[in-house]
Amino acid sequence: MHSYITSLKHHQAELSQCSLCRDMQGPPVFGEPCISPVMLIGQAPGFKEIEVHQPFAWTAGKTLFKWFQQIGFEEEWFRKHVYMSAVCRCFPGKLKNGIPLKNGDRVPTKDEISNCHQWLSREIEIIQPELIIPVGKLAISQFLTVNKLNEVIGQSHNPSQATPCTIFKTPANCTVIPLPHPSGASTWPRTEPGKSLTSEALKLIQLHPAWKKIR
């Protein structure tokens, strides 16, 4: 266990020095190094997250942790028992070609996602998670083929048994249970069928053996 945490701390020290993406705003954000069979993977931090250096630290995070409260887990506990990661670790910004975006943050480019691939891949290698919870379509698409959210949310998936179609290789015993993005800009989790499918996904997470281990 000591070497596990040491490896994560060394990894995070290297990650904190990353400056590969010219248009991304750092510093890189990551969760507490904890011993856990569960990983939560978001899209990218917002401006508030890079200020406080904590994943899901602002409006979307409030909604996300309300979801987990529904199955009995408070934010403080969650942060200490689930390793929180992301597809990209720096803030993409609110500009696109010099024009302010009206709805939310800029979506990371393919090159930015590719640059950050090594960090998430290394975390999966170190942690060997039994349960991955990708949050939002960009994060989900790193593990599953997704056209519409209602085709993947509310279900358990084992990517290693599916047709190879994704970026990250998961351990053979790893389950992926996706959640929609909790951003206020998205109405999907608040309307049907998204509302019911989100609730079903939370129930699957609650019943998963890896989740029971950290309880």
Image: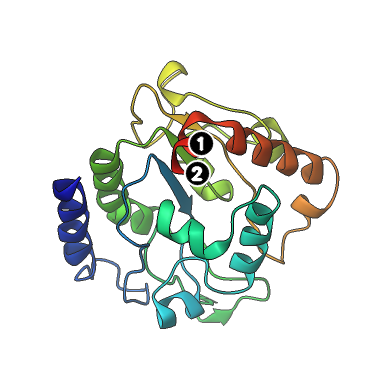
* Residue 98 to residue 192: above or below: below
Can residue 97 be seen here?
Answer: no
Is 85 in front, or is 102? 85
User: Element at badge 2?
Assistant: loop
Can residue 69 be seen here?
Answer: yes
Disc number at residue 201? none
Callout count: 2
Is 35 in front, or is 67? 35
Residue at which label 2 appears: 215
Disc number at residue 212? 1
Which of the 4 quarters of the picture holds residue 62? bottom right
Is 40 in front, or is 152? 40
Residue type at numbered disc 1: Lys
Quadrant of the frame with the N terminus? top left
Q: Position of residue 176 (x, y in %)?
A: 50, 33
Residue type at numbered disc 2: Arg
Q: Residue at x 50, y 65 (%)?
A: 76
Q: CA distance from mark 2 to mark 1?
A: 5 Å
Q: Position of residue 103 (x, y in %)?
A: 67, 71
Please indicate whether residue 193 sits to the left or right of residue 89 in the image: right
| In contact (CB < 8 Å): disc 2 and disc 1 | yes
